[in-house]
Image (spheres, rainbow, N blue to C red):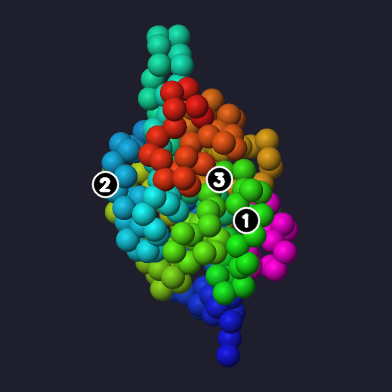
Amino acid sequence: MNSRREFLKLAMAGSTAAVAAPTAASAQAKPKRWGMLVDLRKCIGCQACTVACTIENDVPEGQHRTAVPVYELDGPDGPSQAVLPRLCNHCDEPPCIPVCPVNATFKTDEGAVVVEAEQCVACGYCVQACPYEARFINHKTGVADKCTFCVHRTSVGLLPACVETCVGNARVFGDLNDPESDIRKLMAQHETKGLRPEFKTGPNVYYIGLDDRLASTVAVGGGARDLRQGLETPAHGEV
């Protein structure tokens, strides 16, 4: 019997993935590489994505695979608020994979980083290794949990739940290897940034309109840890 890992790889390899079907010959020659773009100019912090993800993936109360914390940043005209949707960055070089003692975390052929729950021993090493604080030990299942880019949906041509429910169309999901995909077109038109560039993990979640202070100073112990502990917002000035 195939393991869940083998099933996911087969499903992803055979997916028609209508959400990002290649239209250019150059894109057809490459495997899909999923990525997400978040336009912070459109995000209103409504948490529709958080609710949709929680329902879709049966995430326990107080824990989140994705959420939108609100940060207060000090500026010359006083404090201002900034929303920052957070999720696993599905890195090209994910630091969570090599620290796993049982190889429970792996990348699909399309680049999504997922956890084989049946193999996870809940040691928490991956939770500590993630510079984006995107992982947690699921209170219900007792194993490591995180965003999977809704691999069960994308493998059958659907969008991730958070993208489908975003009221402002702030989240765009697609094939980074396809120059004709919506995500690639938007990235060509706008400056994009990723979180924690100093770690050189090659994140595949990008932002339009990201404040440099959030890009470089979101640190371990900040907002995402609060989310893992079930808090909604970090303290004033904490990023």
In the displayed orientation, state which residue is furthest to the bottom: 1
In the displayed orientation, state which residue is furthest to the left: 167
Q: Is residue 52 left or right of residue 228?
A: left
Separation of disc 1 and disc 2 at Cα? 34 Å
Amino acid carrying mark 3 in the image: Glu
Q: Pointer 1: what residue?
A: 124
Query: Callout 1: helix, strand or loop?
Result: loop
Q: Pointer 2: what residue?
A: 167
Q: Pointer 3: what residue?
A: 133
> Which segment is the magenta one?
94-106
Q: State which quadrant residue 20 falls in.
A: bottom left
Q: Work out whether 112 lies above or below 213.
A: below
| Mark sitting earlier along the chain (2/3) | 3
Q: Looking at the rendered structure, which numbered label has been put on residue 91?
A: none
What secondary structure is the magenta-colored segment mainly?
loop
Residue 111 placement (x, y as % from top left)? 59, 61
Task: Check whether the beta carbons of the residues at disc 1 and disc 2 lie within 8 A of each other.
Answer: no
Amino acid carrying mark 1 in the image: Gly
